[in-house]
Amino acid sequence: MGRKFLKDYLFWGFLLWLLGYLLGLLFFILVPRDFIGWVIMPIGILATVIVLFKKIKSKSFKHYVKIGIAWTLIAIILDYVFLVKLLRPQDGYYKFDVYVYYLSTFLLPVLVGWLITKKKLKISLKWQ
């Protein structure tokens, strides 16, 4: 495993998942349970798009598809271990918002990769 693999696939996938997990714990005391996922999702999408445009440097569409697969697997596995098994939500964890979250975790890297590699899109985010 190369350094790029570890960083693009595992590091960013874990960090984005951790952001959502920590926000979930924070919002657990602030937001009704049924809405936590919907409140976190825009923040997660924004963070994911920033990472994809600022931190992932690839000209390969295939690389972005693999990132989408890896990040989705990371989210599914860590959600199962740290939410389903550890916290054992009484009303269950897997609801519509979770499936939208998994789908967007896969599709965002694919769409951004398509925009960057197929359309030769040059987007510069000026935030630092």
Image (tube, grey):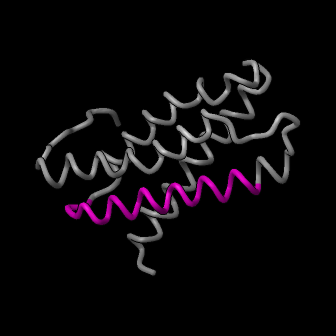
In the image, residue 32 above or below residue 37 = above
Q: State the image coordinates of residue 20 (x, y, percent, origin top left).
A: 61, 39
Which residue is rendered at x = 84% and y = 39% of the image? 89
Q: How many numbered circles are shown? A: 0
**Majority secondary structure in the magenta region:** helix
Q: In this view, does 31 lie to the left or right of 109?
A: right
Q: Which of 111 and 120 is in front in this view?
A: 111
- Judged left or right of residue 11, residue 3 is left
Q: In which quarter of the image is the C terminus?
A: top left
Looking at the rendering, which quadrant does residue 78 occupy?
Answer: bottom right
- Could you tell me which quadrant the N terminus lies in? bottom left
The verdict on residue 75 being magenta is yes
Residue 104, horizontal then vertical, whole percent? 46, 42
Residue found at the far left of this picture: 120
Q: Is residue 115 left or right of residue 37?
A: left
The residue sitting at 76% across, 52% down in the picture is: 82
Residue 103 pos. (x, y %): 48, 45
Q: Which residue lies furthest to the front in this view?
A: 96
| x 24%, y 60%: residue | 61
Q: What stretch is highlighted in magenta?
A: 58-81
Let me know if residue 66 is in the magenta part.
yes
- Looking at the image, residue 66 sits to the left or right of residue 10; the answer is left
Q: Where is residue 70 in the image (x, y as percent from the top left)?
A: 49, 62
Tell me where residue 41 sits by quadrant: top right
The structure residue drawn at horizontal position 33% and vertical position 58%, both measured from the top left corner, is: 64
